Structure formats: C-alpha cells, structure tokens
Amino acid sequence: MDEKKISKAVINRLPRYYRYLGDLLEKDVVRISSKELSEMMSVTASQIRQDLNNFGGFGQQGYGYNVDYLYAEIGKILGLDKQHNIIIIGAGNLGQALANYADFERRGFTLKSLFDIDPKLIGNEIRGIKIRPIDELESYMKENYVDIAAITVPRFNASEIANNLAKWGIKAMWNFAPTDLNLPKDIVVENVHLAESLLRLSFRLSSNKSN
Amino acid sequence: MDEKKISKAVINRLPRYYRYLGDLLEKDVVRISSKELSEMMSVTASQIRQDLNNFGGFGQQGYGYNVDYLYAEIGKILGLDKQHNIIIIGAGNLGQALANYADFERRGFTLKSLFDIDPKLIGNEIRGIKIRPIDELESYMKENYVDIAAITVPRFNASEIANNLAKWGIKAMWNFAPTDLNLPKDIVVENVHLAESLLRLSFRLSSNKSN
DNA sequence: TAGATTGTTAATCGATTAACAATC
DNA sequence: TAGATTGTTAATCGATTAACAATC
C-alpha cells in the first residue's frame, strides 16, 4: 500500500539519475553528494534529494550517497530487478533497429519475437529471433508470456493491433506509431512520438534569436 | 521582439495539437471548439485556450476555431513554413530507419546525406541518398547548408561529433545517443533517449497495482 | 437579438527551490 | 567533537483550472 503518488516529473527524471549513476559506477566513483551530482546533471541538489526521498532515504548525513547502492536501489524502483519479455509488432526499419539494440537485453528486457504482415520479412531472423506472421500473434500470446509489445506499425494499423493485444493480455505497450492509443487504463502505454520530437526541435530552432 | 517566454510544457503540447488538427482536416472538419477538441485529446478546454493564446487569438467567440486556419497557424509557429536540411550521422539501423521515414520530407525536412565510419556502409544509398565517410563531414558542412543533424552514433562517439558539428556551424541536433551533449546554448538539442523511455515504461509497469 | 464560445483574469494546485534542524 | 550533508519543512514559483466579461 505504497500510496504516496509519484509525480510524472519525478518518474521522468529517474532514468536520467540511473544513467548518471551508471556512468559514475563505470568510473569507479564510490560516493557522491547531491551537490556534486546536481552540478554534473545541471539540476538543483534540492531537487535530487526531494526526488529520491519519494522512495526512501538512500543517503547518509555528512557523507552523501553510495553510488553502487543508490544505483541498485533506483534500478529496483525502475523494475529492473524483474525480467521482461518483449515482442515487436512491425519488423520494418524501426522495428529492426529496436531488435538490434542489444543493450536492452542487458537490463532484463528479452526480445522474444517480431511480427509482420509482409511475406518478404516473415521467416527472416534478427539476432536469431524469428519474424512471424501477424496472424500468429493471437496464438503466440496465448502460448507465451509477454508483458511488453513495441508497436512499430504504420499509423492506421496501430489501434486495431493495440486493442487486440490488450484483449490478449498484454501489460504494456511501447508505442512508436504517431497516434494515441486508447486503451483500458490498467494497460501502460509509453509513447515515443518521433515526429512530435522533430517538431519541437523545429519550433526551438525557429524561435532561436541567434540564427 | 516577441519576448513572452513560452513555457516548455506548452511547446511540448503544440505538436500534439498539430497532429489532432491534421487528423480533423483529413476528415474535412471545418470548425472545432476548444471544448470538443479537449474531449478528443483528454485535456481541459481551458488549457487549449491558454496555450493557443500564447501566440495570439486564433479563434472567434461564439464559433470556435477554423481547423484549416488553426492548423496552418500552428504549422507556422512550429517553423514548418521553412525548409530544413538534415543530415544523419550514423547509418546503422536507427539512422537508416530515420532515413526511410519519408514522412519528414512532407513537413519540409529534406534529408541531404548520411555519414558513417563503416566502409561496408559507405557508398550505399538510401532512398537515393548516399552514405558518405565521416571524414568528409567537415568539408561537406563547409560546402552545403545544413541546419539539423540527427546523431545516431554509439554513445562514446557522440560528444566528439557533436562538438565538431557545433564548430562547423550546425544549428540543431536531434540526439539519439544515450548521453547528454554539452554544447553552446545557441545550439538547439532535442534528445530522444529510447533507453530512458523504456525505463519509464518499466517503472510504470512495476508500480501498476493491477498486475 | 440570443446563444455560444472565445480571450483573459483570478483562484487553485502542484512542483521546485531554499533553508535548516537532524545526524552521521 | 567539528564539518559535512542529508532529510524534510516552509517559501516561492509556475502551471493548470475555473470563471466570466467580451464579442462574434
């Protein structure tokens, strides 16, 4: 019953803390204060302490934070102590790019299969993982445990596939299709809208006095 | 001298308004009220009106907003009335996926070239656009006008390339490398940190009571 | 004109920053 | 013990929502 609701802003920052702590760990840094970390990350020390204290006191007065310990704790908060099974729907360029991004495996995200509608792709393998016909998605979902589906299909196919996946028991979708999926709210949807990202860049470029 | 500073939150929402208005336009919807739009988008009507009024009064009392007009105006705000030249640094899976995403062209973003260090890739073409050796980047930048560089190289090469691009006059970077680029602040950096996005999904999945 | 809906001001809410007592 | 730095409360700041007069 951990009922303290974590704000969206805090959740957004957590992975970035995790990344910086991982970098420090690689450099064998043992301890770090909120002040030092805040300077590295260009945020306030106050914010770091507030953010972390949403989840408990990981530091020690007069000392700071143990990098190794804090990294592990944030990892747990992010659910990286659990194993996740992913499938990718849409084995086009983007789907294949994700499939090849082996770094995810390191964090406990195992790619189990890809699905596509294109006969030219079906049967091919990426890193030894087979591309299956989308018709087999339903039976696959019934016979295998999958928690996350990455949606890298064209915009017009996305909602139907998403609705089906929801029906077949998916827990979360990583949506790359440029549309908002409308799903039962117990299903987690994390959107990556690349087109919107480029438009933000464009806006900032346009409103940049210095050019 | 348009000195009313636009908040980050507003900028983030603008491309989504633009997408919804584009969808309405496709469906030949002529007018829409902030109330109707707010219901479609699951936001408050108040927020829509506040956001738009950062840029001027685009609506009409008693009527609402003309979809066509509002779409065009937001397009201008986003800088889509201007032509942009993009290069992609790193022609791996992700770089190629972006290069193939022809939809960007439609919005005035023209892909001019890709660059890579891998001899196996150099000389290949994607949609008729050549992959050049990274050694030629400096001379290319001097001989061509490029405003945006998409960075899809591995983490360890990213900062050096980014610093060079900055030196050679790039205006904006669309950064896909899992690191924070540290650049002069007149250079726009728009980050797409896929790994962080997946960790956010993971967090929300873990803290989801309903599973 | 009456009805509808904007543009905008005021009120509320939430997030960030500052400050400092607690404590290692 | 003295110095450093956390955890946490209080103050500030900014963003969202509500309300309504202006006006089409």
Image: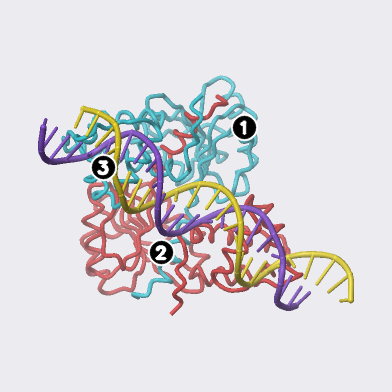
Chain colours: A red, B cyan, C purple, D yellow
- Residue B172 position, x and y percent, is 53, 33
Task: Identify the residue shown where x is 62% and y is 73%.
Answer: A57
Circle nearer the N terminus (3, 1): 3
Residue in view at x 61 percent, y 38 percent? B162
Q: Which residue is mark 1?
A: B166
Marks 2, 3 in one chain: no
The part of the image, by quadrant, that contains residue A61 is bottom right
Answer yes or no: do the residues labelled 1 and 2 have beta carbons within 8 Å? no
Residue holding disc 2: A111
Which amino acid, by three-letter code, is at mark 3?
Answer: Ser
Callout 3: chain: B
Secondary structure beneath dot 1 equals helix
Chain letter of the residue beneath label 2 in the structure image: A
Q: In this picture, is B140 found above or below B37? A: above
Task: Determine the CA span between mark 3 and mark 1.
Answer: 41 Å
What amino acid is labelled 1 in the image? Ala
Please name which of the two marks, 3 or 1, marks the residue nearer to the observer.
Answer: 3
Give the residue pinned by disc 3: B34
- Compared to residue C5, the image places residue A159 above or below, namely below
